[in-house]
Image (spheres, helix red, strand yellow):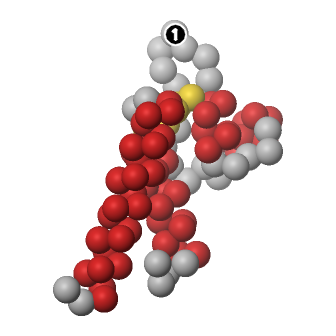
Amino acid sequence: MNTTEQDENTQAEFLDDLTSQLIERHGAVLGSRALARELGYPSASAFQQALVRNTVPFTVFKLPNRRGHFALTIEVARWLSKVRDQANPST
């Protein structure tokens, strides 16, 4: 196995682990509070501002008869993994 394949396997394992952890904590869909917390926003208001400014980097949606905004856990995990890989490409 070459270095590129090892890196890809490591990245895939990280994504799987992160996805599992998020699903265990929040389920398949994250609500506004969980999104703010998992994405590192200092407050729910800061997350709301990101929504208003349209700077959340994945699809955020509303659910009928529910308050707040939601995102699929897998999409959040993929984005977090991608950001991590870009910040630390040798891992």
Residue at 73% across, 46% down = 41
Question: Toward the viewer: 3 or 38?
Answer: 3
Q: Is residue 64 above or below residue 19?
A: above
Q: Residues within 10 Å of mark 1 (few under 14, many from 20)?
A: few
Q: Quadrant of residue 46?
A: top right
Question: Toward the viewer: 88 or 52?
Answer: 88
Q: Taking 11 as reference, is 65 left or right? A: right
Q: Taking 22 as reference, is 67 left or right? A: right
Q: Is residue 41 above or below residue 81?
A: above
| Label total for image | 1
Which x, y percent locates residue 1?
19, 86
Which x, y percent locates residue 27?
43, 29
Q: Which residue is mark 1?
A: 65
The amino acid at mark 1 is Asn
Residue at the extreme bottom of the image, as rendered: 2
Q: Secondary structure at mark 1?
A: loop
Q: Taking 71 as reference, is 44 left or right? A: right
Tell me if I can see residue 84 in this picture. Answer: yes
Q: Is residue 40 above or below residue 23?
A: below
Residue at 52% across, 57% down = 80
Residue at the extreme left of the image, as rendered: 1
Residue at 41% across, 61% down = 14
Which x, y percent locates residue 61?
50, 32
Q: Is residue 6 above or below residue 51?
A: below
Question: Toward the viewer: 56 or 44?
Answer: 44
Residue at 40% across, 32% down = 28
Tell me if I can see residue 49 in this picture. Answer: no
